[in-house]
Amino acid sequence: GFEVSSGGANIVIGFSFSGALVPAGTGVLTNLDIIPTDIEACLSNLIVSSDDALELEFSTGDCVTVPYGIISLGAATDSSLEVLYSSSSDIGGFQFAVSGVDVLGASGGAAGDAGFEISVGSEAILGFSFSGSVVPAGTGVLTNLDITVTDFEACLSGLVVSSSDGQSLSFDAGD
């Protein structure tokens, strides 16, 4: 019978209007729907109170690794555009489209370091390795696009990212 509410600054509050209690013991306290913003998730500033509103001693435990992946656009000039990545998993391949620019080519970055072939077509940019190499988990420049600007804003769409064994990875297209 608890109300669980979340708000700004990643604060979660659980309470009961009827005075219900969580019984002593172990188990799942609640489940959170999250949008990963980092490779680790950690609890902090934990406050737990008794039925008579006294603070109880609790520890938060260790941080956990969460599946995390963002591919976003970085620094731009009249002729180049960075594609950035932040991933908790190795990347075996990727595909995406970019609006607002004509993409003429792609090279360098972590994909280049990993020996990826990067194919640029009219509908999508595709990166993969014939040898099975991967872009290691981490953050940085995935690749650099050679572009011609066609609009005031460039946006990523149609993002598909796979692991080294071809399984789909969950990634968000950043701003």
Image: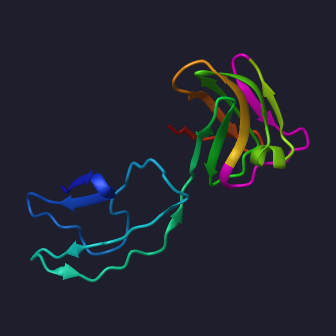
Q: Nearer the viewer, residue 91 or 86?
A: 86
Q: Nearer the viewer, residue 172 or 81?
A: 81
Left or right of residue 13, residue 132 in this image: right
| Residue 32 part of the magenta-drawn span | no
Q: Quadrant of the N terminus?
A: bottom left
Q: Main secondary structure of the magenta part?
A: loop
Residue at (52, 65) in percent of width and height: 64
Picture mark count: 0
Residue at (28, 83) in percent of width and height: 57
Residue at (63, 34) in percent of width and height: 77
Residue 69, given in percent of the width and then of the height, sits at: 59, 47
| Residue 127 part of the magenta-drawn span | yes
Q: Nearer the viewer, residue 52 or 38?
A: 38
Left or right of residue 8, residue 163 in this image: right
Q: Nearer the viewer, residue 76 or 86?
A: 76
Residue 87, given in percent of the width and then of the height, sits at: 63, 51
Q: Which quadrant of the figure has residue 149? A: top right
Q: Relative to 85, does residue 12 appear above or below in the rendering?
A: below
Q: Write the start and end of the magenta stretch as one range.
A: 122-140
Residue at (65, 33) in percent of width and height: 160
Question: Is residue 150 in view from this perspective?
Answer: yes
Residue 45, given in percent of the width and then of the height, sits at: 31, 72
Type of colouring = rainbow
List the single residue furthest toward the bottom.
Answer: 57
Q: Relative to 16, does residue 119 appear above or below in the rendering?
A: above
Left or right of residue 2, residue 169 in this image: right
Q: Relative to 158, does residue 65 appear above or below in the rendering?
A: below
Question: Is residue 164 in view from this perspective?
Answer: no
Q: Relative to 47, does residue 36 appear above or below in the rendering?
A: above
Residue 24, given in percent of the width and then of the height, sits at: 27, 75
